[in-house]
Image (cartoon, rainbow, N blue to C red):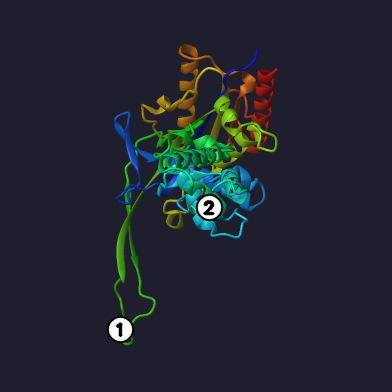
């Protein structure tokens, strides 16, 4: 039977040592109350940001094609100008064509390299007036028209330019635009619905923030002075936790957003790039102070045809530390597995066995073993996605 809808759910349990992964406006680690107790929290935006940074690193290392990953930037004019080849004021030309489509917004704008190149191509082809500089013969002909006719012609030209610019900005979205969406307040036609949703990560257990009292000594004291005291005193707030992370992709929407045109990245490869980046990334708040580079302890990925299923309810009752080893991870895995069983028994159909994949450090997931290393599992998921969508097309 052809697959009409397909959702990819990612569930991650990850222990983070003393750290301040994601700060609020006061510099404190972000928290949330869930199940009546305070939890450590890392915002979805923080993890989406480092996922996109991982994409960019892959481009820099030559692993990923730069054309598939976009820029969230206020310097969009300079980006477009970098692709214009005509001997003109490139930045002014880029400002003109972007203004036609976006009403000159100064906000951060999500732009793919392909879209920037498409805008530049309009300028290079002469299909867009550069800073209202028109050919003299055209100006002379226009002067022969009445003011009403000139106004009508100007409106038609403006509409044509706007539509051309909009078409360029709607073509070939990058992988990250297709995943995380784009909102343009001044022109809703340019909005892109996100095919991926990322939950705020929260600790599976109760946390209390702690404070690090620190001092700094003077390295170059005044002559004949001992400088016995501290030159600087301060405190920094931190916590440690076992986090539950969750994200889901509507693969059927992701496929449509990517376009599937010849020469573009495939759905399977784009999904694999996301999984590598999202699972292995870590937000960098206070990273120099805490060096909290940890790997996930448990990852479960499922492909579902009904609906996304967030299993955070496993931790509505805070997990207690294990009596055997004192840590939270073992009991967090047990709680997650228990919640999964209850959800499938009562609410939703369990994914097929060949549509569920687990990676865990201790080699077991409560069902007789794991499905390989992360790289091996991601390759299997890529093949499963290909099979599902080939069946859909067939």
- Where is residue 115 shown, x and y percent of the image? 57, 43
Asked if the residues shown at circle 2 and circle 1 are in contact, with their CB atoms under 8 angstroms apart, the answer is no
**Mark 2 or mark 1, which is nearer to you?**
2
Q: Spatial distance from mark 2 to mark 1, Cα to Cα?
A: 74 Å
- Depth check, front residue: 71 or 352: 71
Can you see residue 372?
no
Give the SS element for disc 2: loop
Mark number, residue 134: 2
- Where is residue 50 shown, x and y percent of the image? 50, 46
Figure check: 224 above or below 83? below
Mark number, residue 225: 1
- Depth check, front residue: 248 or 141: 141
Figure check: 9 above or below 27? above
- Depth check, front residue: 122 or 269: 122
Give the SS element for disc 1: loop
Q: Quadrant of the C terminus?
A: top right
- Where is residue 20 shown, x and y percent of the image? 39, 49
Q: Quadrant of residue 354?
A: top right
Crowding near the residue tagged with mark 2, few <14, some 14–19, many ≥20 C-alpha atoms within 10 Å: few
Crowding near the residue tagged with mark 1, few <14, some 14–19, many ≥20 C-alpha atoms within 10 Å: few
Q: Residue at x 46, y 31 (%)?
A: 332
Mark number, residue 110: none
Can you see residue 270?
yes
- Depth check, front residue: 88 or 179: 88
Q: Quadrant of the N terminus?
A: top right
């Amino acid at each position: 039977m052809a697959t009409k809808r397909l959702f990819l759910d990612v569930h991650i349990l990850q222990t983070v040592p003393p750290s301040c992964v994601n700060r609020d406006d006061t510099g404190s680690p972000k928290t949330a109350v869930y199940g009546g107790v305070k939890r450590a929290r890392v915002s979805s935006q923080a993890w989406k940001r480092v996922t996109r940074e991982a994409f960019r690193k892959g481009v820099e290392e030559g692993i990923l094609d730069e054309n598939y990953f976009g820029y969230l930037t206020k310097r969009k004019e300079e980006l477009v100008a970098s692709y214009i080849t005509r001997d003109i004021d490139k930045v002014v030309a880029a400002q003109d064509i972007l203004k036609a489509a976006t009403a000159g917004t100064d906000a951060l704008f999500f732009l793919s390299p392909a879209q920037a190149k498409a805008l530049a191509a309009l300028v290079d082809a002469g299909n867009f007036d550069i800073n209202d500089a028109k050919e003299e013969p055209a100006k002379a002909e226009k002067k022969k028209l009445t003011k009403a006719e000139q106004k009508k012609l100007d409106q038609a030209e403006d509409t044509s330019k706007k539509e051309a610019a909009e078409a360029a900005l709607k073509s070939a979205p990058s992988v990250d635009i297709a995943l995380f969406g784009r909102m343009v307040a001044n022109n809703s036609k340019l909005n892109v619905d996100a095919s991926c949703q990322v939950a705020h990560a929260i600790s599976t257990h109760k946390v209390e923030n702690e404070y690090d009292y620190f001092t700094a000594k003077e390295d170059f004291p005044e002559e004949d002075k001992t400088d016995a005291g501290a030159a600087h005193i301060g405190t920094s707030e931190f916590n440690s936790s076992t986090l539950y992370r969750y994200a889901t992709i509507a693969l059927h929407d992701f496929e449509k957003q990517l376009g599937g045109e010849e020469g573009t990245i495939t759905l399977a490869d784009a999904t694999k790039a996301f999984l590598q980046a999202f699972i292995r990334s870590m937000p960098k708040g206070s990273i120099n102070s805490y060096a909290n580079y940890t790997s996930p302890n448990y990852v479960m990925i499922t492909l579902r045809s009904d609906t996304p299923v967030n299993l955070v309810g496993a931790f509505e009752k805070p997990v207690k530390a294990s009596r055997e080893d004192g840590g939270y991870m073992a009991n967090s895995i047990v709680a997650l597995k228990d919640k999964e069983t209850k959800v499938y028994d009562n609410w939703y159909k369990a994914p097929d066995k060949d549509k569920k994949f687990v990676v865990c450090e201790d080699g077991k997931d409560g069902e007789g073993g794991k499905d390989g290393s992360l790289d091996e599992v991601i390759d299997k998921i890529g093949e499963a996605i290909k099979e599902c969508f080939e069946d859909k097309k067939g």
